[in-house]
Amino acid sequence: DTAVSQTPKYLVTQMGNDKSIKCEQNLGHDTMYWYKQDSKKFLKIMFSYNNKELIINETVPNRFSPKSPDKAHLNLHINSLELGDSAVYFCASSQGAGGQDEQFFGPGTRLTVL
Amino acid sequence: SQQGEEDPQALSIQEGENATMNCSYKTSINNLQWYRQNSGRGLVHLILIRSNEREKHSGRLRVTLDTSKKSSSLLITASRAADTASYFCATSDTGRRALTFGSGTRLQVQP
C-alpha cells in the first residue's frame, strides 16, 4: 500500500534515447510534482499538476514532457536523452496546490545516461 | 533559484547528543517545511511551520522560525543512529505555488 510509487527505480540508457518514468499516488491528492535531484543533492521542482492541469513548468527543456492521464498518475517522458539528464527524479504529491501542504515523495528513479 | 541555504553542510555527532541545523532564506514565505532523506530514498516530511508561528514541536524535533531574520532551525534532541540522514528545509514562497528546497545538511550520528 505504497503511497507514492515510481517505476522504474533504476534506468540506464544511451544518449539520444527516449525514456519514460511512471508515477502513481493512492492518497487521493489533487497535486503531483516532478523534482530533479542532482549529484550534489540539490532538489529542484520541474513540473506541477493540479487536477490534471499543468500549473508549474520551471524552465525545463521541452525534451521533458509530463503527462497526467488522471489525477492519480503523472508520468515523465524524456526525449533525446543527454548526459546532463543523469540524476535522481522524484515524484511527489500533496493535497493542496503549491507549497501549502506537506508533500509525499516517491522512492526516486535514478537515471544514468551513458 | 535556490532559496534556502543550510548550515552546516555536514554534521557528525555522538548518539545521545543534540543536533542543530539552520536554514536561511531570502523572500517572504507562507510556511517553511523540514524533510529528511535517508540514503537512496525519497524525502519524508518532518514538520511544517507557518509564517505566523515561532516554534513547533514534534516528538524529539523542535523547529523555530524567525521571519525577521529569514531563518529557521531544526533541533533533534537525544539523537539516535537512525537519525543519520540528510535534512532539507523547504520554503513555500508567497506568490509561488511550489516549494523551494535548500541545499541540505548531512547528519551522521555515531553509535
Image: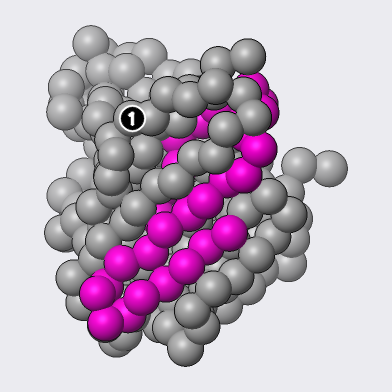
Three-letter amino acid code of the residue under disc 1: Ala
Is residue B31 something one can see in this rendering?
yes
Q: Within the magenta stretch, is there residue B68? A: yes
Question: Around disc 1, counting alpha carbons within 10 Å, would you say few (fewer than 14), some (14 to 19), or many (20 or more)?
Answer: some
Give whichever of B41, A76 is nearer the camera: B41
Give whichever of A42, A83 is nearer the camera: A42
State the image coordinates of residue A73 (x, y, percent, origin top left).
60, 55
Please report the residue visible at 32 percent of the width from the left and 18 percent of the height from the top. A112
Please say if B94 is above or below B61. below
Chain identifier of the residue bearing label 1 in the image: B
Is residue A53 something one can see in this rendering?
no
Q: Which residue is mark 1?
A: B10
Residue extending farthest right: A1
Residue B2, quarter of the rendered image? bottom left
Stretch in magenta:
B62-89
Please report the residue visible at 38 percent of the width from the left and 64 percent of the height from the top. B72
The reply, left or right, for residue B104 in relation to residue B3 is right
Residue A103, quarter of the rendered image? bottom right
State the image coordinates of residue A12 (x, y, percent, origin top left).
38, 14
State the image coordinates of residue B73 (x, y, percent, origin top left).
42, 58
Please report the residue visible at 23 percent of the width from the left and 52 percent of the height from the top. B5
State the image coordinates of residue A15 (x, y, percent, origin top left).
19, 18
The reply, left or right, for residue A55 in relation to residue A64 is right
Specify the quadrant that holds the C terminus of chain A: top left
Please report the residue visible at 49 percent of the width from the left and 79 percent of the height from the top. B54
Q: Within the magenta stretch, is there residue B76? A: yes
